[in-house]
Amino acid sequence: MSIRVERVSKSFSAYPALGDVSLTVRDGEFVALLGPSGSGKTTLLRILAGLEVPEAGKVWFGERDVTRDKPASRGIGFVFQHYALFGHMTVARNIAFGLDVMRRGSRPPKRDIAARVHQLLELVQLPGLGNRYPSQLSGGQRQRVALARALARNPRILLLDEPFGALDAKVRRELRVALRQIHDELGLTSIFVTHDQEEAFALADRVALLNQGRVEQFDAPAEIAANPASAFVTSFLE
Amino acid sequence: MTAAGLREPPAAKALLIAAAVIYIAVMLLLPLGAVLYEALRQGWNAWVSAVTDSDARESIKLTLIVAAISVPLNTIFGIAAAWAVAKFQFRGKTALIALIELPFSVSPVVSGLVFVLLFGAQGWFGPWLERHDIRIIFALPGLVLATLFVTFPFVARQLIPLMSAQGSADEEAALTLGASGWQAFWRVTLPNIRFGLLYGVLLCNARAMGEFGAVSVVSGHIRGETNTMPLQVEALYNDYDFVAAFAVASLLALLALVTLALKSALEWRYREELAAIH
């Protein structure tokens, strides 16, 4: 599903976190929001998720204006920086959460939920770990559980906040590949936040480079490398 | 953590442990033992008849009613206050935290007097209440109000640091997964704070049942009507009815022991979770 951000602004008290940002992501694209800390990339992601409401501007998912929609009704999956897995639930219950909280009329029967959890565990390559608790998993495994949980309700859009930030280099590379595969296989539109230029360039179809709440450049990695749009882009890439 | 430079000589270690054990024995165990000894001095039957005496029974009933009203209310208020403080940024937050702690720093007598000043016959709302035939002071509502005031901080104080440390990521995750705010609260927030909450509720309950000062001011000391257990103990003691006084007191002491046992059981049951928090 395509995503259109139209002149969005958001400030926290006096300091502007996002100033007049516009951005269009095509259906099926894999986009990285790249920038130094404080550039507003996470704020933009949270606005897309509905966790923050912009002061000005609009957000469109396809033909639908979702600017004021609640996170629950946006049809998104969100992977948090530190995963935010529910520590008191098993991996299976974590993954099933999105289905368990559905209204009685539309909630799938228990068998179907269990089957879906099984299928998602296969998808993220953690078969058989459903009965573990998050505290019994490694960082990379937690990340995969968080991804499976976010995908349980078949979102069309996947949003990830620094998804590999807390992991070591080897696990990070494995997960990158896995994430890209899942993105392609499910036909998702994905946006992830990172401050790691190498990661953004390796993984994304297009990279939006943010600085001080503005988009400096939004292009394919090769294009950014070949034609940096501003002095900031040039210096950030060094 | 024992730093090498801090290792005491064995004599000092033995001395410190002995001092702690003796102090605890003299200050805590001796009085507790004395209460039980005095309560049972004239035998089991005397104890039973003392705690089943009609005034004693009424005082137990009243104490249970007061706790049954004030503990749930302060649990709800405590969760709400802790939620507001821990998950939102707003002006006057520090002042709010200080206010939550106020009942701990105010003398219980003053806490009771406040309500007499407000609702007593000579108080601000006294004449109005009298016209509408509503009794607050020297009646159950006054006892509940005073207890609510005194026990307010227990749950909130227990939860504020816990909820602040946990942040809002889990709740946000629940919302993005399609949960309503209510579902996020019941399925995510409450399980996350359950240990601290239970602990706070236990302490709140112990104090609600044991409170003397504030309750004494608003009670009016009508036996069989407005005397809670601690007040009944005092009344019996003033009558020189020591066996009965200590018998009722032993019930209160028993409550303290049960609270302590429950708390230890909880700490043991959730030790891993606790270790993760600290």
Image (cartoon, coloured by chain):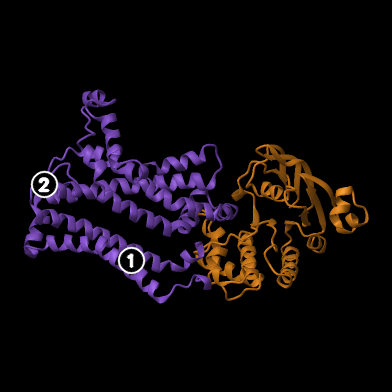
Chain colours: A orange, B purple
Foreground residue among B86 and A147: B86
Query: Which residue: 12% across, 56% down?
Result: B51
Q: Which of the two discs, 2 and 1, sits closer to the camera? A: 1
Residue at the farthest right position:
A226
Query: Which residue: 72% across, 48% down?
Result: A38
The residue type indicated by label 1 comes to: Ala
Real-space Cα separation, disc 2 to disc 1, in angstroms: 34 Å
**Both labels 2 and 1 in a single chain:** yes
Instruction: Look at the image and tell me whether residue A191 can be seen.
Output: no
Does A10 sit above or below residue A222?
above
Q: Quadrant of residue A118?
A: bottom right
Identify residue for label 1: B20
The residue type indicated by label 2 comes to: Asn
Instruction: Look at the image and tell me whether residue B266 can be seen.
Output: yes
Mark 1 residue element: helix
The chain holding disc 2 is B
- Describe residue B157's horizontal placement relative to residue B123 as left or right: right
